[in-house]
């Protein structure tokens, strides 16, 4: 096993990986930008190194600086987390060239599966169902029109080299096709440095279901069941749960076997996620494979009891997986709400600034993966995700009730967050009944009656925040009259030494 690991990321995912290091007795190294000098992951690691300016292009995306820190610190391996360089072929290859273990798949696997056109061809050869569409990149307008007429409108234009909803356009009429191609091409070039696009059939109101997999370097491959990710806004996941409300034992077996075939067909190792779309007739199609740890991986950890990050460490160090498919059991139900520094009342605009009050929920069945604390200033330079709130319960209904309670207890003041939005979802009949798909937010929460309900929740939350702020000021005045605790003084001094 490794003696020292560098975490090439920030925020809640960096802290989550660092915690796994600490539990396994592995020394940890973090990197930070100007904006993250006082970030939680900077303090939590055994060692922390400054790598550049606030902009990610000058810090977290600088491969040579991260490699340099790994060599200086003596880190044997690098965990990329997700986002930033996690699916960057060049970064994985740079680690390989320097003799540093990349905790993830090989650069060849990332390259194959990161290209959505190539990965679809690989899956098709392995007899895994894929969404009908173009066989390769689309460049000519006439070619796009012919394909759209062959498979039928609506179609989806997608960037070949990226994800997260960038470079994607839904086209419902022939007249929209040319303009949408240009828009998708420009966005793909800007976001991923690759303008390549392709076309596939747009599935109306599908469910988005993914399977978590683990594969070692000795030919052993397992899946850890499914996660439902259909609550999305602009192709970005907001809420995940397991098991899926629509899953049957037969469908789970069939999709699980397809996920394993996808891994074997691409010679994939370490942790990954095979994503599928399921239509109204319960037919499933391969969508893509994410060659990294997913944001929503704790959902699977709660229902299986398996620490996926620790398994990643073991696999990357060359160990043979002790887990067998027959040993993986699903217990209860889990739900994750992504808590982001965004204002749902203002079209989910980023909300940055200092957190004046922070109090996370607790109690049985609650897990909070967080990257912030009271007093921390949320920067504008990075993804707005600041924490993940998860619950586990014996049943889905009980998990929803527990999530409602946890959201009520979660207090974050000083910035706007997505907590009121999640509260609304947990109280929406369609979600509670499991009767939802990827159009849920637009078609259900977009209705006037639900918008009014959201504003009522937001207003109540704002009133409570004002009361808590007033109480906080009064308490601060009282505390200032008392002698400061020696424990707080020691804590501050320790933090200053880390800076």
Image: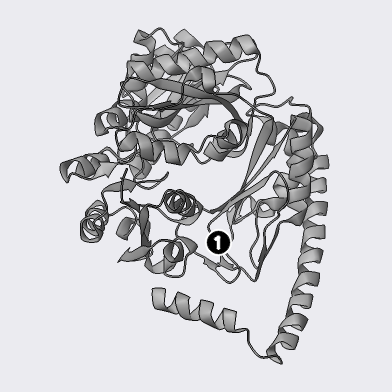
Task: Give neighbour class at mark 1: few <14, some 14-19, many 20+ (Cα, 10 Å).
Answer: many
Please name the residue shown 38% across and 68% down the image.
34
Is 80 situated left or right of 338 in this image? left
Query: Could you tell me residue 286's position as x and y percent?
Result: 47, 18
Mark 1 secondary-structure assignment: loop
Question: Considering depth in this image, is 322 or 20 the residue closer to the camera?
Answer: 322
Name the residue carrying label 1: 372
Considering the image in quadrants, where does the N terminus appear?
A: top left
Residue 352 lies left or right of residue 343; in this view the side is: left
Relative to 11, does residue 79 appear above or below in the rendering?
A: above
The image quadrant of residue 207 is: top right
Residue 178 can be seen in this image: no
Instruction: In the displayed orientation, state which residue is furthest to the left.
Output: 97
Does residue 395 show up?
yes
Quarter containing the C terminus: bottom left
Picture mark count: 1
Residue ID at (37%, 56%): 28
Q: Position of residue 390 (x, y in %)?
A: 64, 44
Expressed as whole percent of the image width and height from the top left, the position of residue 392 reads 68, 38
- Left or right: 304, with 165 as reference point: right
Residue 347 x/y as whole percent = 63, 50
Between residues 372 and 278, which one lies in front from this camera angle? 372
Query: In this figure, which colouring scheme has been used for the structure?
Result: one colour
Q: Quadrant of residue 290?
A: top left
């Amino acid at each position: 096993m490794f003696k020292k690991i560098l975490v090439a990321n920030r925020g809640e995912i960096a802290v989550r990986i660092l915690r796994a290091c600490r539990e396994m007795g592995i020394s940890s190294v973090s990197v930070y930008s100007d904006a993250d000098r006082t970030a939680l992951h900077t303090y939590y690691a055994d060692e922390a190194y400054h790598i550049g300016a606030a902009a990610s292009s000058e810090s977290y995306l600088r491969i040579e600086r991260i490699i340099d820190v790994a060599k200086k610190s003596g880190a044997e391996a690098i965990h990329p987390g997700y986002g930033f360089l996690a699916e960057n072929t060049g970064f994985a290859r740079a680690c390989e060239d320097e003799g540093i273990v990349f905790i993830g798949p090989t650069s060849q696997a990332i390259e194959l599966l990161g290209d959505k056109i190539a990965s679809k061809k690989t899956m098709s050869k392995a007899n895994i169902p894929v969404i009908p569409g173009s066989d390769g990149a689309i460049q000519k307008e006439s070619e796009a029109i012919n394909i759209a007429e062959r498979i039928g409108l609506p179609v989806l234009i997608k960037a070949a080299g990226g994800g997260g909803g960038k470079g994607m356009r839904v086209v419902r009429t022939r007249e929209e096709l040319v303009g949408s191609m240009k828009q998708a091409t420009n966005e793909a070039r800007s976001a991923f440095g690759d303008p390549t696009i392709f076309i596939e059939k747009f599935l109306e109101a599908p469910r988005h279901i993914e399977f978590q997999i683990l594969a070692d370097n000795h030919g052993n491959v397992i899946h850890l069941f499914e996660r439902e990710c259909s609550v999305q806004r602009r192709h970005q996941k907001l809420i995940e749960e397991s098991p899926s409300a629509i899953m049957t034992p037969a469908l789970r077996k069939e999709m699980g076997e397809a996920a394993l075939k996808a891994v074997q067909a691409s010679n994939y190792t370490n942790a990954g996620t095979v994503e599928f779309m399921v239509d109204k007739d319960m037919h499933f199609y391969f969508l893509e494979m994410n060659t990294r740890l997913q944001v929503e991986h704790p959902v699977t950890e709660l229902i299986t009891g398996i620490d996926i990050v620790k398994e990643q460490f073991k696999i990357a160090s060359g160990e043979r997986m002790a887990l067998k498919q027959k040993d993986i059991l699903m217990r209860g139900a889990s739900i994750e709400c992504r808590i982001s520094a965004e204002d749902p009342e203002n079209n989910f605009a980023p909300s940055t600034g200092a957190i004046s009050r922070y109090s996370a929920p607790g109690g049985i069945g609650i897990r909070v993966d967080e990257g912030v604390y009271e007093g921390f200033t949320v920067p504008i330079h990075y993804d707005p995700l600041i924490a993940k709130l998860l619950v586990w319960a014996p049943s889905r209904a009980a998990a929803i009730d527990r999530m409602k309670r946890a959201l009520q207890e979660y207090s974050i003041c000083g910035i706007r967050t997505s907590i009121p939005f999640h509260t609304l979802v947990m109280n929406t009949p369609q979600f509670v009944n499991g009767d939802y798909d990827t159009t849920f937010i637009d078609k259900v929460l977009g209705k006037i009656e639900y918008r009014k309900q959201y504003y009522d929740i937001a207003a109540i939350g704002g009133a409570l925040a004002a009361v808590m702020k007033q109480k906080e000021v009064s308490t601060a005045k009282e505390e200032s009259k008392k002698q400061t605790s020696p424990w707080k003084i020691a804590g501050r001094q320790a933090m200053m030494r880390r800076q």
